[in-house]
Structures are given as structure tokens and as C-alpha cells.
Image (cartoon, grey):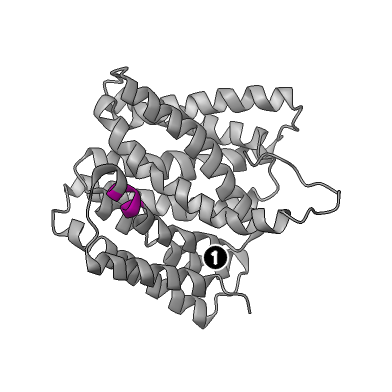
């Protein structure tokens, strides 16, 4: 699941292949988030769903950390982990789930959140000392254009309510701030015990808001349980862990550029699961997105 710590043993021949495959695996897993929301939200309100998800993940990882005797953070490190966890989990996922729940089309929400790489690139130089080249700026712009083409048809279906749109923007800002904060303050965290703090803090926030804003009622159907299990194991443990590994190994702007691939990948998954057709303009947008991500991640 990506919890192995740095080893001093010689690298195996397969290790470079595993590292090279991590971005593609991350994009594939992250793209299923909208699909999971579509399956789960009919049976629980968004913050209630996320509260169950984050709480169970925190408990499972706490048990795993104790069994594996993982080192636990102390003092100010706990505060940094909690802040990053709230931004990435509570603010981003809470905003996306609540936005879709309030009538915003999934494609529109993914378009708004897809602007995140531009914001990260804009602040990475000032806050993290990362240099964003002209070629990478061109790739970011090209990727954004591709995302716009992919969701063009969904935009014509309606933009949802003003509240829903605002929640998508809130999710965008949360993920942007979380990515930069994680890179700057939490790069050396243990991926086992550190995630316990992050998911625990996020669970406290979303459950606190749910008690005020929602009924917290859940319809325990087979579909909901499967959606919850997928969100816990594949997304919260698998995808989030991969995200932190990628942030630790690469530049924040480069990692964020992978988010451009999420809407096209989600569209492909939706085609096979829900028979949602891809128009030629969407296929062209997917191609532009792939090229844009390649430009952002190119090595000098």
C-alpha cells in the first residue's frame, strides 16, 4: 500500500519500473473518486459519508501503525500534519462531495478543481523555491485547455446552484493549499502514523460540521457499503498514500499537473460503467491534456 520506508538495500531491477508507474496508478485511482461519489451519495449526505470514511481509515491505520511499531509524530509536527490533512481531505473532498450533492455536474466540478495546477505553479516558486520554466507554463495552459474541451458538453447541461459552484471553488483552494503545505511542512512524515493524524483531524472536522448541517442518516445498502469500502481502501489509503509519495519525490507543480488527467480518465471510466459517450471534441481534449502533462513533467 506504499507504507514501506526508505531502505538501504541495493535497488532491484523492478524498482525503477514501479516508480515510473506510480503517476499513472495515482491518476487511475484518483479518477474513481467521482464514480464512488455517484454510487455513495444517494445513501448518505456528503459530510456524513466522509465522516465514516475518514474515521474508519484513521482507526485501521492506527492499528497498523501500532503493529508495525511506526514512529509517532510529536509537538509541532502533529499540528502540521493535522492542517495538511484538513486541507487535502476535509476541504477538498468535502467541497467536491458537497458540490455534487448540491446539483453541480461532476464534469463542471472536475473542471473547476482542474485549475489547481495553475495555482500551485503560481505559488510554488515563491513558497517552495521551485522554478517553473516557460515550457512547463505552456504545458499547464495546454492541459487546462484540454480539460475544458473534455467537460464542454457537461457545461452545457447546467452549472448547478451558486452554493454548489462555491463549494467546488472551496475544494480547489483546499487542494491547492494542501499540496503546497504538505510539500513544505510534511515531506518527512511517516506514511503510517502521519496518515492517522491527517485522517483523524479530517474526520473530526467533517463530523463536527455534519452534526450541524446534516441529518447524519445513512441507508445501509449493499451499494453504499461497497462504495464506502472502495473509498476507504482504494482512495483514502491507496491514492492518498501515492499522492504523498509523489509530493515527497517530485516538485509540487509537477505532481499537481497530474490532476489534469483526472477528468479525461473519469470520462473513460464513466463510459464503461454508465455508457456515457465520448464526443470527438472530448477525445481531442484528452489528447491535449496528455501532451500538457508531459510538458510539465519533462526533465531539462
Q: Which of 27/274 is in front?
A: 274
Q: Which residues are magenta?
A: 266-271
- Residue 95, compared with residue 192, is above or below; it is below
| Quadrant placement of the C terminus | bottom right
The residue sitting at 50% across, 82% down in the picture is 134
From what the image shows, is residue 168 above or below residue 286?
A: above
Image coordinates for residue 260, horizontal then vertical, percent = 41, 62
Residue extending farthest to the right is 9
- Which residue is under mark 1? 254
Q: Is residue 113 magenta?
A: no
- Residue 171 picture location, percent across and down: 37, 48
* Residue 89 horizontal side relative to residue 4, left or right: left
Quadrant for residue 214, please give it: top left
Quarter assignment of residue 37: top left
Q: Residue 267 magenta-drawn?
A: yes
The quadrant in which the N terminus is found is: top right
**Closer to the camera in the image, 144 or 229:** 229
> Residue at the spot x=59%, y=56% of the render?
21
Look at the image and tell me whether residue 183 can be seen.
Answer: no
* Residue 192 spot, x, y in % from top left: 66, 34
Residue that extends furthest to the bottom in the rendered view of this protein: 134
Amino acid at each position: 500500500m506504499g507504507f514501506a520506508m526508505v531502505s538501504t538495500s541495493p535497488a532491484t531491477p523492478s524498482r525503477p519500473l514501479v516508480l515510473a508507474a506510480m503517476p499513472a496508478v495515482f491518476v487511475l485511482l484518483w479518477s474513481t473518486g467521482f464514480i464512488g461519489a455517484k454510487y455513495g451519495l444517494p445513501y448518505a449526505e456528503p459530510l456524513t459519508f466522509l465522516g465514516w470514511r475518514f474515521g474508519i481509515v484513521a482507526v485501521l491505520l492506527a492499528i497498523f501503525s501500532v503493529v508495525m511499531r511506526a514512529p509517532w509524530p510529536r509537538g509541532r509536527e502533529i499540528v502540521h500534519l493535522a492542517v495538511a490533512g484538513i486541507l487535502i481531505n476535509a476541504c477538498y473532498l468535502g467541497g467536491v462531495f458537497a458540490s455534487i450533492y448540491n446539483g453541480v455536474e461532476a464534469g463542471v466540478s472536475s473542471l473547476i478543481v482542474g485549475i489547481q495546477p495553475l495555482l500551485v505553479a503560481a505559488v510554488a516558486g515563491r513558497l517552495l523555491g521551485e522554478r517553473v520554466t516557460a515550457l512547463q507554463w505552456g504545458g499547464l495552459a495546454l492541459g487546462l485547455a484540454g480539460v475544458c474541451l473534455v467537460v464542454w458538453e457537461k457545461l452545457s447541461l447546467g452549472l448547478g446552484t451558486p452554493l454548489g459552484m462555491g463549494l467546488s471553488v472551496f475544494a480547489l483552494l483546499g487542494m491547492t493549499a494542501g499540496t503546497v503545505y504538505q510539500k513544505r511542512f510534511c515531506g518527512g512524515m511517516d506514511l503510517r502514523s502521519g496518515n492517522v493524524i491527517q485522517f483523524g483531524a479530517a474526520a473530526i472536522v467533517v463530523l463536527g460540521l455534519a452534526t450541524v448541517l446534516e441529518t447524519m442518516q445513512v441507508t445501509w445498502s449493499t451499494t453504499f457499503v461497497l462504495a464506502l469500502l472502495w473509498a476507504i481502501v482504494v482512495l483514502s489509503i491507496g491514492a492518498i498514500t501515492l499522492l504523498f509519495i509523489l509530493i515527497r519525490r517530485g516538485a509540487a507543480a509537477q505532481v499537481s499537473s497530474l490532476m489534469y488527467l483526472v477528468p479525461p480518465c473519469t470520462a473513460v471510466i464513466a463510459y464503461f460503467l454508465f455508457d456515457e459517450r465520448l464526443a470527438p471534441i472530448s477525445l481531442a481534449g484528452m489528447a491535449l491534456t496528455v501532451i500538457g502533462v508531459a510538458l510539465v513533467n519533462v526533465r531539462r
